Image: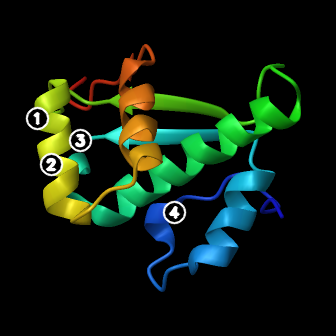
Amino acid sequence: SRTPAGVLFLADCTEGLGHERLVEVVRDALAFVAVLTHGSLASKSQVQEITLAMKVAKEAVVANHGAAPALKCIPVHIRSFRFPSTAELRLALEFLLKEPAEFEVQGVEDLLKTIAVHISIEAP
């Protein structure tokens, strides 16, 4: 269920969508854009949204017998984001999610391996 404008900013959903509605929104999306900042990997909600989007995209590939997924996951980062090593990422996820499932770790790793778009917020 896309919005009339075609865009939904999860950051604007202050009341939260709830897990089932979030799954529905992500499955219906054409793209999932994760804006990565210095606090992204410390945000439980952002990490959960990333892992959900990556899981939905992978499920679509399996369902389409290897064809490209309908959902495109696009990382966008600003200068303050530092790409972590694999060990740093695992430690951050263990701290944040306590016992992260392998699909959660793999989802975040896969997104971070995707060539990210850099956006400068300091531009005049």
Q: Which mark is residue 88?
A: 1
Quick check: marks 2 and 4 in contact, CB under 8 Å?
no
Q: Residues within 10 Å of mark 2 (few under 14, many from 20)?
A: some
Query: Which element type, helix, strand or loop, lies under badge 2?
Result: helix
Q: Residue furthest right?
A: 64
Residue of label 3: 37
Q: Which mark is residue 112?
A: none
Q: Residues within 10 Å of mark 4 (few under 14, many from 20)?
A: some
Residue of label 2: 92
Quick check: marks 1 and 2 in contact, CB under 8 Å?
yes
- Measure how far apart labels 1 and 2 are at the Cα level: 6 Å
Answer with left or right where residue 20 lies relative to residue 82: right
Residue of label 4: 10
Q: Position of residue 38 (x, y in %)?
A: 15, 42
Q: Residues within 10 Å of mark 1 (few under 14, many from 20)?
A: few
Quick check: marks 4 and 3 in contact, CB under 8 Å?
no
Residue occupying image coordinates x 88% and y 29% = 64
Answer with left or right where residue 5 lies relative to residue 108: right
